[in-house]
Image (cartoon, helix red, strand yellow):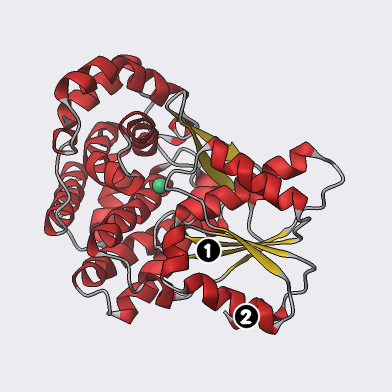
Amino acid sequence: MDSLEQLTARQALIVTDHFMVKTGFVDRVKSHLDRNNIPNIVFADVESDPSLDTVTNGTRLLLQNKADLVIALGGGSPIDAAKAMIYFAHKASDDVLKPTLVAIPTTSGTGSEVTDISVVTDKVKEIKIPLRDELLIPDMAILDARFTRSLPPAITAATGMDVLTHAIEAYTSRQANAFTSIYAKYAIRYVFDYLLRAYRNGDDMEARENMLLGSCMAGMAFNNSGLGITHSIAHSLGGIFHVPHGLANAVILPYVIRFNSFDVGLRYQEIAQMLSLPAATVEEGSASLIQAIFDMNESMGIPTRIGSLKIEEDAFTNHADVIARNVLEDICTGGNPRRPSHSDILKLLKEAW
Ligand SMILES: [Zn+2]
C-alpha cells in the first residue's frame, strides 16, 4: 500500500463498491493519496457483475474530472468496471491519455489485476460482454492479503474455486504453453494447499496470502492461454440466472473435466499426480481429480449440481438451447481442449443438472 505514495497524479478516481466504503478500506486508500497530495474522488456504485449503465456513469465521471490515476479497489467487479471505464473513455475521445490504473484486489479470485480482460453485463439482453484490449492491463497490482481477511467463508469458497477453474482451464487450454503451464500448475497447488484453510479460518494469514498469490498466478496463466467451456457456461448462467461466477464454475468444473478427459486426459493425470492423487492411468487420474473437486466443493458447502443452485427446472430446460448457443459463441470456448457441439453442451448441462 505504501507504493501508492510513490505515484504522481493530478487527479485520482477510486472505483469501488459501497461495502469497501463501509469497511473503511476506501479511507485507507484515500489517506495514502492525501499524504501524497493527490486530490481524489470516489465512485462507489459498482454492483456485482457491473452493468453497462454503471460503466457509462463511471466513464462520465472519469472524463469530467480528467482523472489521470484510477485506483480500482474491490473484488473482480470494481476492477473490471474500472478497466471498462478506461476503455470507453479512450474510445470516446482520442485526446484522453490513458490514466494509470492501479488494481487492489480484495478477493482471491478473478486475477483481474493482471489480465487484459473485463466482463460487463448487458442487463437488457441478459448477456455478459467480455472486453479484451491491451489498454485494460493494470499498470500496477497491489496484493495485500489484509484486505481479504474479512471475506466471509462462502465468498472465500466461491472465489477460490474460480482460481482453481482458471488454473485448470489454463493448464489444459489449446493455447497453453510451457510458461502458462508453470503458473497454472503452481496456482492449482496453492488452491489445494490453502483454500480449505482460508475457508475454515479467515484469520489464517498464510493461507490468505498464498490464495492471493495463487489467484494472481492463475490470472497470469489464463491471460496468455485462454480458458475453456466451464467459463463459457458460467458466463451464460450468470447472465441469465445471476449465479455468482465462482459458484457456477465450481459446480460445472468436474462435469467439464469429464467431458474433456476423453481428449486431454493426460493433462488431468499430470495434475492428479502433482497432487499425489491416485493416477496410475489416464482414466484414474481424471477420475481422481474430478472426485477431489467434488470433495473440496462439499467441504465448503458448494452444491454438486446445477439443480441445487436455486434455478427452477422449467426455466433451465427452457433456456438450455440459449445457453448452448451462448457457450458456442463465448470467447472462452476457443481455448477448450475438446471442441463441443451444440448437442454436446446440451448433454453436459443435463448431466450437471
Ligand atoms: Zn473466472
Quadrant location, the C terminus: top left
* Badge 2 amino acid: His
- Residue drawn at point x = 14 percent, y = 42 percent: 304
- Residue drawn at point x = 35 percent, y = 44 percent: 245
User: Is residue 340 positioned above or below 146 on the image?
Assistant: above
Q: Residues within 10 Å of mark 2 (few under 14, many from 20)?
A: some
Q: Is residue 129 left or right of residue 170?
A: right
What residue is disc 2 on? 32
User: Is residue 300 positioned above or below 207 on the image?
Assistant: above
- Residue drawn at point x = 25 percent, y = 49 percent: 269
Q: Is residue 52 left or right of residue 99?
A: left
Callout 2: helix, strand or loop?
A: helix
Mark 2 near mark 1, Cβ–Cβ under 8 Å? Answer: no
Quadrant location, the N terminus: bottom right
Disc with the residue nearer the chain's start (2 vs 1): 2
Q: Where does residue 200 sit, x and y in percent of width and height?
A: 18, 71
* Badge 1 amino acid: Leu
Callout 1: helix, strand or loop?
A: strand
Residue 143 visible? The answer is no
Q: Residues within 10 Å of mark 1 (few under 14, many from 20)?
A: many
**Cα–Cα span, label 2 and label 1:** 13 Å
Task: Count how many numbered circles sit on residues in the image.
Answer: 2
Q: Where does residue 52 sit, x and y in percent of width and height?
A: 55, 36
Q: Where does residue 36 sit, x and y in percent of width and height?
A: 72, 81
What residue is disc 1 on? 73
- State the mark number for residue 38: none
